[in-house]
Image: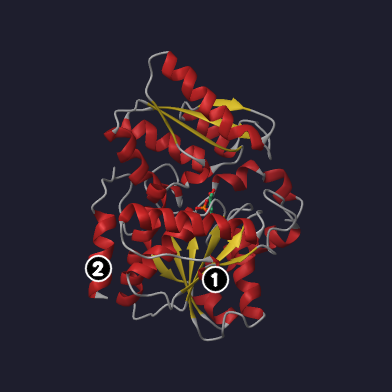
Amino acid sequence: MFLGYLMIWKVLSYPRYRLTSLPTPLERATRLSKELGVELLIKRDDVMELCLGGNKVRKLEFIIADALKKGCDVLITRGATHSNHVRLTAAAAKKAGLDVYAVITPPGSLATQGNILLDRLLDVKLVPISRAEEADEAMEKLAEKLKSAGRRPYVIPAGGASELGVLGYALGALEILQQSLSLGVKPNYIVHATGTGATQAGLTLGLKLLGASDVKVLGISNGRKASEVTKRLVDLFNSTAEMLGVGVKASESDFTVYDEYSFGGYGVITSEVVNTIKYVARTEGVLLDPVYTAKAMYGLIDLVQRGVIKKESSVVFIHTGGSPIVFQYASEVEKYL
Ligand SMILES: Cc1ncc(COP(=O)(O)O)c(C=O)c1O
C-alpha cells in the first residue's frame, strides 16, 4: 500500500481546479443490504456543491485546470440532450470565468426541462445537430471558427473521457478505499454506470496503483456494447498510465462490463428502469436517474440474484449523479408510476 501511495502521488502532482469539497459521503444502505443479502454502501457522488453534482465533476477538476493553464477562454464539448456532462462542464466553466459551447445530439428533446433547462440558465451556447456521429467534427469546426474570431477554445471529448479526465477517478479509488477502511469495510466490488469510460478506467487505474486490484470494478453499460466500452477502457487506461509514467498496462481481461442492462439502448426508459428508481427511493430515500444510475442499480441487483456478486460480500455502488434527468423524462417515467 505504501508503494501505492507513492504511485498515486503522481496523480496528485497534476494541477486541479477545485469544484467541490471532497470526500463525498459513503453511506451504508442498511435496508437495501438486508433485502439483497450483501453489505451495500453507496458512494454519493451525486452530492456535490457544483450544480447538482455527478461523476463529471472529478474529471473536470483536472480538465479545467489544464484549460486555464493553456490560457483558453472558451470550452467546447458535446453530449446528448440529457447530458450531465454538458451541464457540469457549463457550471465548471462559469465558476472558472470561461464561456462554453455544447454540440447537442439525440436522443431526447430540446424542450426547456431537466439538463437543457439548466444548460440554458448557465448560458451554454447550444449547437443542436441531428447525427451523433458528426458531433466530434462539429466541435472541431466550431473550434476553428472561434479561433478565427480571436478566441482560445479548449475541446473536451464526450463525457470528459481524456487522460486528464481519467485522473479524477484514479483519486476517487483512493477516496473510496480510505472511507471504506474507516467504516471497517473491505470492498469486494465497486459497481457503477459506465459510458464513455473515464470513470471505470480511472477507478481501475487507481486500484492498480494502490495495489488493490482484488477489488473488482463492474461497469454497467448505459447503451454501448460491452466490447466497444472495453476497447475504450483499455485505450484510456493505457494512455493515462503512459502520461503518468507509472509503468502499468491493462488488457481487455482487466475490465468487466455488462451491456445487458441497457434495456434497448441509451436513453430508453422501460418499466424495469422506473421500478428500480421507485424501489431505491422507497427503500433508502435515494433518487436514481432513468438513463444511467437506475440501469446500473438494476444490474447490481440482478448480479446479486444470479450469484455473480456473492452473498455477504461488500459492494460499493457509485451514485454517479443525473437527478435532472428524472424531470427531463417525466412523461416517460410517469407511464410506469
Ligand atoms: C450520471 C452518469 N453516470 C455515469 C456516466 C458514465 O460515466 P463515464 O462516461 O465516465 O463512463 C455518466 C456519463 O455521462 C453520467 O452522466
Residue furthest out toward the bottom: 312
Q: Quadrant of the N terminus?
A: bottom left
Query: Label 1 belongs to which residue?
Result: 253
> Three-letter amino acid code at disc 2?
Tyr
Task: Indicate left or right for 289 with 76 as reference.
Answer: right
Whether label 1 lies within 8 Å of ligand 1 gets the answer no
- Tell me if residue 277 can be seen: no
Q: Nearer the viewer, residue 171 or 71?
A: 71
Q: Quadrant of the C terminus?
A: bottom right
Q: Nearer the viewer, residue 39 or 201?
A: 201
Q: Nearer the viewer, residue 50 or 174?
A: 174
- The location of residue 21, given as percent across then percent down, is 30, 52
* Numbered tag placed on residue 5 in the rendering: 2
Display colour scheme: secondary structure
Q: Nearer the viewer, mark 1 or mark 2?
A: 1
Residue name at image x 39 percent, y 80 percent: 186
Total label count? 2
CA separation, marks 1 and 2?
25 Å
- The location of residue 25, given as percent across then percent down, is 37, 62
Task: Indicate left or right for 248 with 217 as reference.
Answer: left
- Tell me if residue 219 can be seen: yes
Residue name at image x 62 percent, y 27 percent: 128
Q: Is residue 303 placed above or below 89 in the rendered structure?
A: below
> Three-letter amino acid code at disc 1?
Ser
